[in-house]
Image (cartoon, helix red, strand yellow):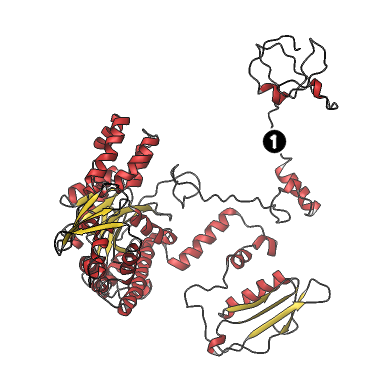
């Protein structure tokens, strides 16, 4: 990057500058990026670094020359500040073009083992990673006493084989019990590494409605035995808090396990999974109009209204719901203790998305990465909680203030704390509100812990009353701080973890061979849709998009000939010819239409041109028009 350096074109220059910045561990900000000139300065300019560069096109209108680069860097390395923005996917892709750049052909097997070697250098030996779980357990328990790391194994052919593991940090357990609502969303997601097991997650929600991971587990399959073991370890960690609600999907194994391990908990079923299963057998407008509204109904009266509409349309449908989905899935049946009104298990799905970039790691690295992510999350939110002011979280108060505007309601008080609230406009619905007991007959206030519209209307009609005084303490600043007051200590890398005292070697689980490439994304249901993006084919000859090698016009003819010899001539696409069809009941002959001068007199009432003005003439019409007509009996056209 010295002054006077020449590069083939602007793309080559920018790639070289990117490689230079990655190698020397600095980032730069672009001032000007045009086809003929480029100007940038160091990202640490505000910190005093004077480095800058300017390059422009030479007289040949192609080459790029560095014109200005007067200073060297005076800033420290920026490689350890999270993401290094100059290491883009384009730079990584260029580093992978071994064959194109070095003219070396590498076999698939060599590339595969090279990748495995690189992963081993980065994350350690996969075979040793399961035995290394005991060292991870010792490191966690030494740095954070009372944390839970439980490892289970089985003996097969006199070998101790890994079976499953449970992991919950003390800060997460205490934060859930002291600062979160008694609600857990439990689900699992498949791992994408060599061990194709399941990563189980148990997530809570804080007062800000933010994701709060509590515990993790890893096992091979979603079975009743594995889920029961995971839930028993979870019960050992958190106990059975009063008013605990647990939301799961419709999986048979997890539903039965929750019923056995947490018999007193309120067991909710995810509405999305319920609807997907329901639509396999029943569908129609009446269910589209009533099934989801029944789930969102706060009051039993409104639930029964939608339930009755479905029962009248299809009695078998409601019997199916009673027999196959007998857990709680409607707000009208929710307990008033947990103060969580979710009807879906999206919280657990969000946690799965939170860890999806790490599911291919070795197991010891995966658990350590989850610990690091939790450590960063707790630290960030602990600092945020220290800055908060007031009694109730600010975003809760803002939301209530917004909802208090433009309320078209009438309020009639019966005492200082009670009254009747009704909508204007003659709907006939009215609700009884009790501010002292914090109840409304619509039941939204009792279930969510935040005043409903009827309560908001009554509170704002009373002088000197504040909306935040009627919000449940689960949404207070104090509870938010308690949720994140626990400190998750940092750990050294795995080479420095303490030695374990277990007296045997933990072998990896027995792998099951599967056909095809390892799946990294789950198969989506028919109702979820797709991203809508379609890839474009890249020609292997000229590297351009939009055409195949055998139609390439920009590539080297010798390369095309070599490709033709290796792959053979491509087979032409078979196109089924469109055969003209005639109506067997019609005697009208169909012949190609000829271009004729317009003759209004020779046009029938249907707009079809006649071959002549006399009688007994053959109808001349395009094929598409004739085929679209109904059956016609042969007759004279006059």
Could you say which is closer to the camera, residue 346 or residue 72?
346
Residue 332, relative to residue 73: is it above or below? above
Could you say which is closer to the camera, residue 384 or residue 409?
409
Rendered image quadrant of residue 279: top left
* Residue of label 1: 573
The quarter in which the N terminus is drawn is bottom right
In this view, the residue farthest toward the right is 597
Instruction: Please report the residue visible at 71 percent of the width from the left and 49 percent of the height from the top.
Output: 547
Which structural element holds mark 1?
loop
The quarter in which the C terminus is drawn is top right
| Count of marks, rendered view | 1
Residue 173 visible from this viewpoint = no
Could you say which is closer to the camera, residue 504 or residue 357?
357
Residue 234 location (% of width, % of height): 22, 58
Mark 1: few/some/many CA within 10 Å (<14, 14-19, 20+) = few
Could you say which is closer to the camera, residue 146 or residue 363?
146
Residue 559 visible from this viewpoint = yes
Describe residue 384's horizontal placement relative to residue 557 as left or right: left
Residue 39 location (% of width, % of height): 67, 79
Residue 584, relative to residue 51: is it above or below? above
Residue 186, relative to residue 71: is it above or below? above
């Amino acid at each position: 990057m010295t002054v006077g350096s020449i590069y083939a074109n602007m793309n080559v220059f920018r790639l070289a500058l990117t490689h230079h910045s990655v190698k020397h561990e600095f980032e730069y900000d672009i001032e000007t990026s045009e086809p003929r000139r480029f100007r940038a300065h160091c990202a640490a300019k505000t910190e005093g670094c004077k480095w800058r560069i300017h390059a422009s096109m030479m007289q040949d209108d192609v080459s790029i020359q560095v014109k200005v680069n007067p200073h060297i860097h005076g800033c420290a390395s920026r490689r350890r500040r999270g993401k290094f923005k100059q290491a883009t996917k384009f730079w990584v892709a260029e580093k992978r073009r071994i064959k194109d750049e070095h003219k070396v052909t590498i076999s698939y097997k060599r590339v595969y083992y090279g990748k495995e070697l690189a992963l081993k250098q980065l994350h350690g030996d996969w075979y040793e990673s399961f035995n290394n779980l005991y060292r991870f357990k010792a490191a966690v328990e030494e740095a954070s006493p009372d944390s839970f790391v439980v490892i289970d194994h089985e003996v097969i052919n006199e070998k101790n084989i890994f079976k499953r593991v449970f992991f919950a940090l003390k800060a997460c357990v205490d934060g859930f019990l002291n600062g979160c609502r008694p609600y857990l969303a439990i689900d699992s997601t498949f791992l994408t590494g060599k061990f194709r097991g399941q990563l189980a997650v148990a997530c809570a929600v804080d007062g800000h409605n933010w994701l709060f991971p509590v515990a993790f587990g890893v096992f091979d399959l979603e079975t009743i035995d594995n889920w029961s073991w995971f839930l028993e370890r979870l019960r050992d960690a958190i106990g059975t808090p009063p008013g605990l609600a647990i939301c799961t999907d419709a999986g048979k194994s997890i539903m039965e396990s929750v019923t056995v391990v947490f018999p007193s908990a309120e067991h909710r079923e995810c509405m999305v999974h319920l609807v997907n299963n329901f639509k396999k057998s029943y569908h129609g407008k009446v269910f589209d109009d009533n099934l989801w509204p029944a789930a969102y109904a706060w009051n039993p009266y409104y639930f029964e209204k939608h339930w009755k509409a479905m029962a009248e349309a299809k009695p078998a449908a409601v019997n199916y719901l009673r027999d196959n989905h007998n857990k709680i899935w409607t707000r009208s049946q929710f307990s008033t203790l947990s103060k969580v009104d979710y009807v879906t298990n999206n919280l657990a799905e969000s946690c799965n998305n939170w860890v999806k970039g790490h599911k291919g790691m070795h197991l010891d690295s995966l658990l350590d990465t989850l610990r690091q992510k939790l450590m960063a999350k707790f630290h960030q939110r602990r600092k945020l909680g220290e800055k908060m002011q007031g009694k109730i979280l600010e975003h809760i108060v803002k939301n209530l203030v917004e909802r208090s505007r433009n309320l078209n309601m009438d309020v009639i008080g019966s005492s200082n704390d009670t009254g009747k609230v009704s909508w204007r406009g003659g709907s006939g619905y009215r609700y009884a509100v009790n501010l002292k007991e914090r109840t409304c007959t619509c039941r939204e206030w009792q279930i969510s812990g935040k005043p409903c519209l009827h309560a908001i209307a009554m509170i704002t009609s009373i002088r000197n009353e504040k909306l935040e005084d009627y919000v449940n303490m689960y949404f207070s600043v104090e509870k938010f701080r308690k949720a994140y007051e626990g400190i998750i200590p940092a750990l050294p890398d795995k080479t420095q973890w303490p030695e374990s005292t277990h007296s045997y070697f933990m072998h990896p689980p027995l792998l099951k061979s599967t056909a095809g490439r390892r799946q990294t994304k789950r198969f989506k249901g028919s109702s979820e849709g797709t991203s809508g993006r379609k890839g474009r084919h890249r020609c292997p000859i000229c590297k351009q998009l939009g055409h195949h090698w055998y139609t390439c016009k920009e590539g080297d003819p010798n390369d095309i000939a070599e490709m033709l010899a290796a792959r053979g001539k491509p087979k032409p696409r078979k196109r089924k010819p469109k055969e003209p069809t005639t109506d067997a009941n019609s005697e009208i002959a169909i012949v190609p239409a000829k271009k004729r001068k317009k003759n209004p007199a020779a046009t029938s009432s249907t707009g079809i041109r006649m071959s002549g003005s006399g009688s007994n003439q053959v109808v001349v019409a395009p094929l598409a028009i004739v085929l679209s007509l109904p059956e016609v009996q042969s007759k004279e056209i006059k």
